[in-house]
Image (spheres, rainbow, N blue to C red):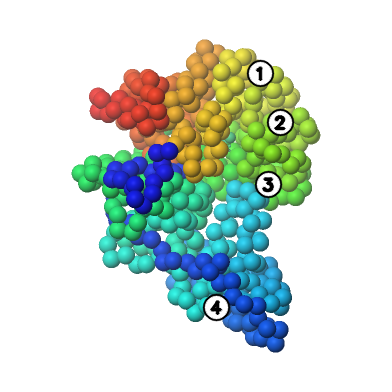
Amino acid sequence: MSTTTTSTSLSADRVLHGVPAVAGVQYAPVIRPGARPRPEAFPGDDVAEADRPVEVRRLKAAAAAVAERLRERAAHATGVASEVLATTATLAQDRAWLGDAEKRINGGAPAPRAVAGAVDKIADALAKAGDLMAERVTDLRDIRDRVIAEVSGLPEPGVPVPDRPSVLCAEDLAPVDTAGLDPALVVALATSLGGPTSHTAIIARQLGIPCVVAVGGLDEVPAGVMVMVDGGLGTVTVAPDDATASAAVAASRRDAEAARSWIGPGATADGHAVAILANVQDGAAARAAAETAAEGVGLFRTELCFLNRDSEPSVDEQARIYAEVLEAFDPSAKVVVRTLDAGSDKPLKFAGHADEANPALGVRGIRISQIDPGILTRQLQGIADAAARTGTAPWVMAPMIATAAEAQAFAAEVRSFGLAPGVMIEVPAAALLADRILAHVDFLSIGTNDLTQYTMAADRMSADLATLTDPWQPAVLSLVATAARAGAAAGKPVGVCGEAAADPALACVLVGLGVSSLSAAAAAVAAVGSKLSQVTLAQCRAAAEAALGASSAADARTAALGALADGE
Ligand code: PEP
Ligand code: MG
């Protein structure tokens, strides 16, 4: 496929696709972190019984030395970087892995093999626990590599200090690699693994440098090669045309300038209003979003509040958590609360998920209420209580609706709590029958992440399938158009709350397709609002038509950008 490269076939102007993490464009040569010790390269003979206490002491001394160095760096760093370094230092002496490694040494393993075995066991368990826990695996593996290097007398792994502005590329970047980076010298980050909530993305956001994660083929790009990183589009272009890349960097600087001065409310240049909202996962995120020009919340992912919970939170606890989000904005602001989207990549222990062969196509989202209707009822009670406490009128929507009957049953229950019901359009079947679904609910919100996954039959978490899971796919846009048309016919709002709404150009296309609101990560709000304010509704419609007529995601993007530029 087009994103796959090899060191021999790596050609100029090759566009590698990943997941956008922090917007912005930069163009500079690649640097890569120093090699990490490969645990499998340290099998070693078993340690004689008499030498095992010494080996244990060597391990503890190495862990202590690594922790001490990290603490020292934490003391010299600031903000999130300092927190990240301090947390990693604590992890270096965590009893969970250290105790297991000690047992392995007492069983005969040399320290490096014991460290690798102990850490990998915990890391595998975390990786299986899913999305957010899996992000912590990088931290643990970083500790593993540092302790193995220390105990083996090897240089500490890490990022070289570049002598000119560079793009740091790696499989994944551990917190200690990214903490303390100088944004004047490391101007963008790109990783072949990781997710948009990884430490790499968090630090890039803090440093204000563009970042793309899960980039297919990135590991084949050697140090020294010029690349252009587009953190908004989620692409890394290898050896692009010099003039084109420099122009893209300059344009991105101008866009960033314009975004900084955009204060909302959302509208096209000719005054067509489009609410620009934020996606949040808790009260803190909602308060941060309220500091931006976001007009409200288009998606409150409630399941993210409870990922670590073994038992279902009480109605009262839920009400308290939801109230924090509801009161972050003015009481008249729009806040859309999504009921628990448990399952697949976000399992909740208390939802009683069965062991499924194919969880993305299994009992997730609204389907859980077929098995245990009480979870939904108690959540709606919690939302209704939060609304009463805060004097707000939240909209409430269900994830993973596939049929009109599911929408009808959900709407009836939501209305019984005096709340306004809507559903997410994430399943192609729901987009195709949006008109029949709208007979029961007050609004639709299109989740382009899952809608793309299910339309293209491509796992949204797969870095290898990033070309297929691109929301610019014309088939996906066609389903968005169908849902938006149904909304217009019914006179009911249809928003987009998937990542597509965070891409300023695609956001304009979505408006051209007829969506009435856009909800994105708070960090993307200004760029989206600012872009929309620079184009007319007619330009958005022309871009939508051009994208719908394309036969690939790449062509759709090119055609839409052309249409948006026309008349500028
Ligand atoms: C989506 O699928 O687009 C969506 C917004 O929901 P989530 O990403 O939480 O699955
Ligand atoms: Mg979804």
What residue is at 27 percent from the left and 42 percent from the top?
A: 248
Residue located beneath label 1 in the image: 404
The image quadrant that residue 529 belongs to is top left
Number of the label disc, if any, that sits on residue 306: 3
Residue 498 % position (x, y):
51, 34
**Counting other residues with Cα less than 10 Å from the Cα at mark 1, is it few (<14), some (14-19), or many (20 or more)?**
many
Q: Nearer the viewer, mark 4 or mark 1?
A: 4
Q: Nearer the viewer, mark 4 or mark 2?
A: 4
Label of residue 151 in the image: 4
State how far apart marks 4 and 3 are (Cα): 39 Å
Near mark 4 (Cα within 10 A), the count class, few <14, some 14-19 or many ≥20, is: many
Q: Which of pointers 2 and 1 lies earlier in the amino acid sequence?
A: 2
Residue 65, given in percent of the width and then of the height, sits at: 54, 79
Q: Which residue carries the number 2 mark?
A: 367
The percent position of residue 403, horizontal first and vertical second, equals: 66, 21
- Amino acid under disc 2: Arg
Q: CA distance from mark 4 to mark 2?
A: 51 Å
Pick the residue in front: 315 or 453: 453
Rounded to the nearest whole Å, what is the CA distance between mark 1 and mark 3? 29 Å
* Image vertical order of residue 453 relative to residue 65, above or below: above
